[in-house]
Image: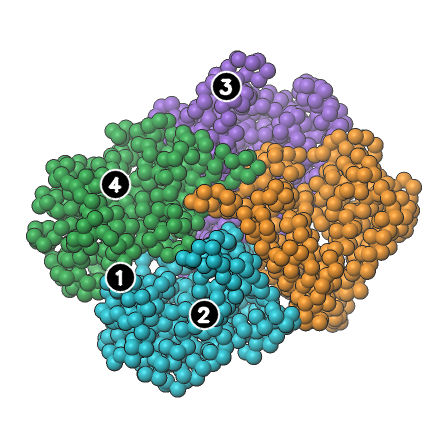
Chain colours: A green, B purple, C orange, D cyan
Amino acid sequence: MSRRAVRVALIGTRFMGKAHSNAWSQAAHFFPGRPRPVLHVLCGRDRAHAEILAARWGWRHVETDWRRAVARDDVDLVDICTPNNLHAEPAAAALNAGKHVICEKPLARNAAECRAMLDAARRAKGRLNFVCFNYRRVPALALARRIVAEGRVGRVFHVRCVYLNSGSMNPNAPMRWRMQADIAGSGPNGDLNAHLVDAARFVAGLEISEVAAAAETFIKQRPVAGQPGKFGTVTVEDAVIMLARFHGGALGTFEASRFGRGRRNFHGLEINGEKGALRFEFEDMNRLKFFDATLPQRLQGWTDILVTEPGHPYAGAFWPPGHILGYEHTFINICADVLEAIGKGPRACARLQPDFADAFKVQRVLDAALKAARSRKWEKTGC
Amino acid sequence: MSRRAVRVALIGTRFMGKAHSNAWSQAAHFFPGRPRPVLHVLCGRDRAHAEILAARWGWRHVETDWRRAVARDDVDLVDICTPNNLHAEPAAAALNAGKHVICEKPLARNAAECRAMLDAARRAKGRLNFVCFNYRRVPALALARRIVAEGRVGRVFHVRCVYLNSGSMNPNAPMRWRMQADIAGSGPNGDLNAHLVDAARFVAGLEISEVAAAAETFIKQRPVAGQPGKFGTVTVEDAVIMLARFHGGALGTFEASRFGRGRRNFHGLEINGEKGALRFEFEDMNRLKFFDATLPQRLQGWTDILVTEPGHPYAGAFWPPGHILGYEHTFINICADVLEAIGKGPRACARLQPDFADAFKVQRVLDAALKAARSRKWEKTGC
Amino acid sequence: MSRRAVRVALIGTRFMGKAHSNAWSQAAHFFPGRPRPVLHVLCGRDRAHAEILAARWGWRHVETDWRRAVARDDVDLVDICTPNNLHAEPAAAALNAGKHVICEKPLARNAAECRAMLDAARRAKGRLNFVCFNYRRVPALALARRIVAEGRVGRVFHVRCVYLNSGSMNPNAPMRWRMQADIAGSGPNGDLNAHLVDAARFVAGLEISEVAAAAETFIKQRPVAGQPGKFGTVTVEDAVIMLARFHGGALGTFEASRFGRGRRNFHGLEINGEKGALRFEFEDMNRLKFFDATLPQRLQGWTDILVTEPGHPYAGAFWPPGHILGYEHTFINICADVLEAIGKGPRACARLQPDFADAFKVQRVLDAALKAARSRKWEKTGC
Amino acid sequence: MSRRAVRVALIGTRFMGKAHSNAWSQAAHFFPGRPRPVLHVLCGRDRAHAEILAARWGWRHVETDWRRAVARDDVDLVDICTPNNLHAEPAAAALNAGKHVICEKPLARNAAECRAMLDAARRAKGRLNFVCFNYRRVPALALARRIVAEGRVGRVFHVRCVYLNSGSMNPNAPMRWRMQADIAGSGPNGDLNAHLVDAARFVAGLEISEVAAAAETFIKQRPVAGQPGKFGTVTVEDAVIMLARFHGGALGTFEASRFGRGRRNFHGLEINGEKGALRFEFEDMNRLKFFDATLPQRLQGWTDILVTEPGHPYAGAFWPPGHILGYEHTFINICADVLEAIGKGPRACARLQPDFADAFKVQRVLDAALKAARSRKWEKTGC
């Protein structure tokens, strides 16, 4: 595998900008023998802020206009961590410019935007079009996928997914871009339900054919930051609940909310199948629960697998068994796989998942959910 | 309080017949000072079987025709544990005959049947019309209700209820009456979802206004017991999933299935509110998890309350703190409350909950669920 | 098996008197086909109290002198639930009178008393000499024993046992007999550590050869009930901690305390062996955790077995899978096994465990613990 | 605070070398505004291996002789990650050379070595003498300490500590330096029990006055790596169990083993006090369980605090609430505190804990444990 450098331009300097800066910093420490990532360009609209971050994480250059970042000849890969309304254009531009692209989720504000991005990706043959559904690279969920793929779960009857935080429960907290439909596209539907839908697809290996849903905005007016006395209107939902039917007959329930008192970043998933069942909770992300119904009945139960063994996905790159990993490692694992694919060449890049085609399918489900919430009936996803 | 006897006629000799026989046997052991229950008449269609049970549990008389049991002058209370199609008639007859009535859930096969039973109950003033939603008398759920009533949860945003067993997963297991719509009315909708809907109403103190749903029968043909080679058609669902809107704006998700691999009798409930949250799982029924968002943030978390203290509902009647109770105690608690109400007189009997009016509301939700599953749109419950 | 009656005389009317009354009441309900227990004589020094209890539980006769109870011709089995200083005499008298004897734990105040009881038992051939280490009949611990016996744990390296309650933490709570050495023999050593030592022996199938220990009385003076202003001296320990070596080389740690803040009746046991490991906590007594190190490493973990299946010990007698049992069922299971042994005859009675020989071994360990606490060095148990 | 650089020389290139390389790399990313660490010199006896690691982590220079590393003028801080027999000399040399020193635990092979190092530290005024008991900087344990310091636990009655892995259970695994007394000093006593003793001291704020113990070597001969057919003798224990008395009267139990089947890196601690109790398990290191006995009794229970809030120790530097941290973050937190102390100056350096004086106390307890295991009686620690 080539040891050539991959010069990264990261667009975005907030939460995801930090998570990705860390991941690019760390990938070569734990996953040697792949192309070497270079923290080359950090792009943020607020130059002063971007320069602080660049200095802290070692980004060599700062840009304030994503167009300039994307256009640079000395950039190999563009990593998009901007708000959702600023995914489609930079991604297409970068792909058209021959760059590899990785983009935060949700890929865009709606399926139409995703579709355009997918088209651009298909034109840019041999370039990565990767979407950061980072939960796929939680070792425990990667193991869950492997257990399903080995046939240990059998026919799936139920998928149950809940993503709760309590991030919007304080009525005095100011308006954020995540509460504005023109920027975010949607609220927890795109922010949280997107993770659930992708995780369900990934682990179960099934697509959702139709959905019913409800969405609710519990607090409709929010103070505007820096403008005392001024309130703005929340134009996204605070919570979305969804029923789903999968191709093949499984039933699914999905719930995503920013009003989940008691939950800070709870992503729970359970799959009940003919031969086995799986459970996962992100706040205990180093653990996977597996129920093997093929064992003698008196020994059956939920096995709590601490996913830190050398034979577990990704775990061997870090620490000895029993030394747990955290949230940030999901991004390091992404960068490791991205670098490996680039090292292996265009065919590996084309195969790396989740890609824009995955995100498009996810987005069709999400769009169908909001449509169903409005129409008050079941809607097909088109997947 | 009077120490007079309450002569019970129990109709039904299977699972619930055993659970209620036990409860009537035990009530006076742990809850003295109330009218004394007399295990007077056991009624079952199979006389030989009924006589064995009667001898085992101490029932004084055996009847094989519920009409005779209900008509007996020496019976004060009729306890109905028959299949669902045999609730309405005996209940109405017993009420008309001036007996107290307690009836297993679901109260009937559908809301129309419930309505007729409720009408009979309203005519029978001063008589108990009690429905055995036994989860209300799990000490932990009674405590949950109390915590909500004390205002410790505040405005409710989310209710999440899941009831899973794996009771129908074996395709070779023969047809049971619970799989036949003419007898059972429905499958897990009436069997399991009924528990969830009542528990949600009870703990949250809120009614469901509308629902969307899906229902599925995963295995449509079953062997007929005792008739080798013969198969019958399952006419109820194996699973039902449901979205709900509550009056007041809370969102709910409900799931009930007999295909919940890994779960044997899992009844999970979570409520997320403004000031607090509650969680409960029936397989760990002695525990209630409470999240108090009014504590200092650094000390907030889910408090795992072992509900066995003298100050906890029902617990003081049994054993010292830390000595847990089981499934059967929910029925003992029911009998204790029933006997207390009878001892206190007609007004207490009229107030004892859950009553037929509760069950009617539950059934309207359940009926709306199956209607919504067919119509593929949201349906009002009428509650 | 004979269906003849077994007429029981129960001596003791407090906590254990209630638990045993319940067990004798319930045994025939759940375990038919064995000799029928008759609640024949209840013996308590306070006649008024005893008569109330007798009426509540259906004891036919009341005695106030254990000698009279034991001497009655119409008694087949004497069940001893008195304070520890009143075990030896009644047990020997009953055995000498040809009765079956079952006795609460600890069997006596010290090994010398146990030895005398054991001698009496050996003289009384064909009669039961059973000790109510009730944890052996928790279905989960019976399953644990079975798993060890099947060789699934292999050579045992570690045994870890903790029994904590917080029963003596209130300094204002009055003196009880359990705090007085002349009556109780010891404090949590006999009360709690006895359970641990027996459970360890039972599950691991190993005897303890030597111990080191410390004992402490945290609150040395207690108010005397009913005598305001008067204080008595606590003459037993509040806590005992113990190291152990087992024959065969395993190491053990034991801890028993009435000052275990946060724990109400916590009996935890863990065994780590070559091929597997087991964990149990009594407050979740329907669950056993089993780690099977012979599974593929990526699937290894602690399997949480809900011990309510028909194939699990005792569970099938009660309710369907997933419907949990409570503390009291351990005593029902004892009565069921006792009745079965009596029905089968003298050889079965001689084999039923735990017997006085077991209790003698346990007591030798407990005595060695207190001796070691005083001598400040390791002491042999003689086992 | 100064932004001057701190040039680090790291001695050791194995597990701890990697963990510390990572921590020095990451500290400035998450804890800006402190002196900037420079990964200046990596020292390892195997030059080729050291150069690979240096290239991977960005160490500027490689040395193969610790004397040269310590003597360099361009080094400000020496970080000692060598086997235990190579702590004392480099530490003393570095302190004598005016460097700050941080050293892995156990500080040395025995208390005498620690004593000499402590003397060197006391002579080197104003220089750090820090010991990497990294568990103190698990956010949850730092919170535990704070809860105790706030008086929320009150008088401590019990401390219970267990550290289990299964690292030596494979009899075919070759001899390691950790199994050789001349290099390691002891086995899990120094490796694991050291962590427990320090954590107990830290959280409870109490010193251990005397101990009893047992130690055992379960597998006494091991294959020698690279020499087929040759076996060496294990000269340390595989497991040590210990009873402790604390000043103030609390009782403690400690257990450390490499034969803890089912446990991979289990560090459990529980403290039971008058007013509250605390529990922690390292494999779930983002959680602290706190039992507050001052709450109304019906609401008491173990509160499961997810220690990821901005107000929790260290957590705010990383990710939003609910995004968990891993093992490696404990070392990052150490580096952050070390850099802060250096930035603040000599008095802050002198106060930073745990220091050599802490390690000396820990080692006196560990030495007393092995002495007690040999003498078979209680031994004073001298603390």
| A237 relative position to C266: left or right | left
Q: Check disc 3 and report its element: helix, strand or loop.
A: strand
Q: Is residue B360 left or right of residue B11?
A: left
Tag in front: 3 or 4: 4
Which percent across, then down, holds residue C268? 60, 53
- The tag on residue D183 is 2
Please name whichever residue, C378 or C75, is drawn nearer the observer in this view of the structure: C378
The answer for how far apart the CA atoms under marks 1 and 2 are is 25 Å
Dot 4 amino acid type = Gln
Q: For the residue marked with disc 3, what is the amino acid?
A: Arg
Q: Secondary structure at mark 1?
A: helix
Seen in the picture, residue C303 relative to B47 is either above or below; the reply is: below
Quadrant the N terminus of chain C occupies: top right
Residue named by callout 1: D52
In this rendering, which labeled residue sits more in front, label 1 or label 3?
Answer: 1
- What percent of the width, then of the height, locates residue C167? 65, 60
Chain of the residue on which disc 4 is drawn: A
**In the rendering, at what x and y percent does residue A114 appear?**
19, 38
Q: Nearer the viewer, residue B147 or B247?
A: B147
**What residue is pinned by disc 3?**
B222
Q: What percent of the width, then of the height, locates residue A147?
A: 39, 38
Residue holding disc 4: A353
Give the distance between the C-alpha atoms of the residues marked 1 and 3, in whole angstroms.
65 Å
Q: Secondary structure at mark 2?
A: helix
The answer for which chain carries disc 1 is: D
Label 2 chain ID? D
Q: Quadrant of the C terminus of chain C?
A: bottom right
Q: CA distance from mark 1 to mark 4?
A: 31 Å
Q: Is residue B267 visible?
A: yes
Mark 2 burial class by Cα count in 10 Å: few <14, some 14-19, many 20+: some
Residue at coordinates 33% horizontally, 40% vertically from top-left? A199
Query: Distance of mark 2 from mark 3, alpha carbons?
Result: 69 Å
